[in-house]
Image (cartoon, rainbow, N blue to C red):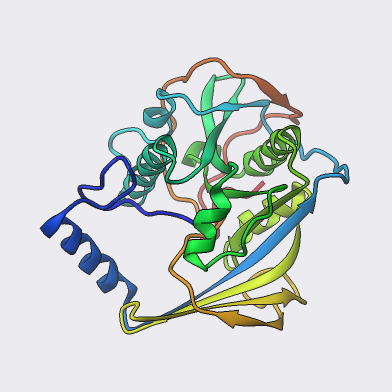
Amino acid sequence: MTFKPYPHARGDGSLGDGLAMLRARVARRMALGLFSERISIGFGRDMSVAVEPPAARIPVRLREFQPDDLPALFPVGGDKAAERECDDVRWRLRAAAHGVLPSRCYVLVDVESDRPCHIQWLTDPGYGDAIRRSGALPVLATDEAMLENAFTPMGFRGLGVMAAAVHLIAERARSLGKRRLVAFVDADNAASLKAVERAGLTPCSVRTRRQVAFGTFRTVRFEAYAGAVGRRACPTSRGEGDGAHAGDGIPSQVDARKAGPPGAAETIANAGPRSAPSPPRNTDPAAP
């Protein structure tokens, strides 16, 4: 489940009052259009089963988010997509601080340059209540956690940092007593699909969300996974139900530029030989 930022949103997670709230709701509805369909693949990992750590092509460390990471990940002058992603991160930070969205934010850091190269969220206890209200994701058990909202700056894409981040965050989840890790990935997000599989998660479900008439009518269908990962994912029917709009566990990533260093880092991941960053591609540019 993902709460999106809105103009004049308050720190407690609400959208504001009066005309500001109305304008935000109208803009969101108009953006939905007359009809849309979004297919995501649900992944899971049994944390009691050991997996081989995926190696990034640069040495990286994982630590919790620090305030200086935001301008480093999203420097001034980025494109509109990066600005929207930055706004979303700011909103999630406020929502988490006020207990609206119980989750914690992690950053992967390039050891050599001391720059943040990936950001991602892990749900905290109590997050299942928010999922239960949304209806667009399966409710988490007390020993389950979910990954959400991954982002890799432009200069670090193609280096395998997302797979390394998923693995290291999974290990954090294990240390917190979680026995299962889940994530939802857009079916057309080829690089992120590959990254979560490299990190030891396996596809187990297909989620199809449809909306009609600017979001007036919405349905969410969960089916058992029974085919190839990607646009041609083959589901097996498991029933459906209505639910509110929610974002993917690991959404498509957007452009940004490298910037100045953040603070010190902690947990280190295995890394292979360093190479020059790959240019952006038409698919998700965070490919390992």
Compare residues 273 and 197 and report the one nearer the observer: 197
What residue is drawn where x is 40% and y is 23%? 68
In the picture as drawn, the residue positioned furthest to the top comes out as 264
**128 is higher (above) or lower (below) than 216:** above
Q: Which quarter of the figure has residue 108?
A: top right
**28 is higher (above) or lower (below) than 98:** below
- Horizontally, residue 30 falls left or right of residue 47, namely left
In the picture as drawn, the residue positioned furthest to the left comes out as 19
**Residue 250 showing in the rendered view:** no
Expressed as whole percent of the image width and height from the top left, the position of residue 57 reads: 69, 34
**240 is higher (above) or lower (below) than 102:** below
What residue is drawn where x is 36% and y is 29%? 71
Expressed as whole percent of the image width and height from the top left, the position of residue 279 reads: 52, 46
- Horizontally, residue 248 falls left or right of residue 179, namely left
Expressed as whole percent of the image width and height from the top left, the position of residue 226 reads: 77, 77
In the picture as drawn, the residue positioned furthest to the right comes out as 49
Q: Which quarter of the figure has residue 163?
A: top right
The count of marks equals 0
**Residue 127 showing in the rendered view:** yes
Expressed as whole percent of the image width and height from the top left, the position of residue 175 reads: 74, 32
What residue is drawn where x is 57% and y is 64%? 137
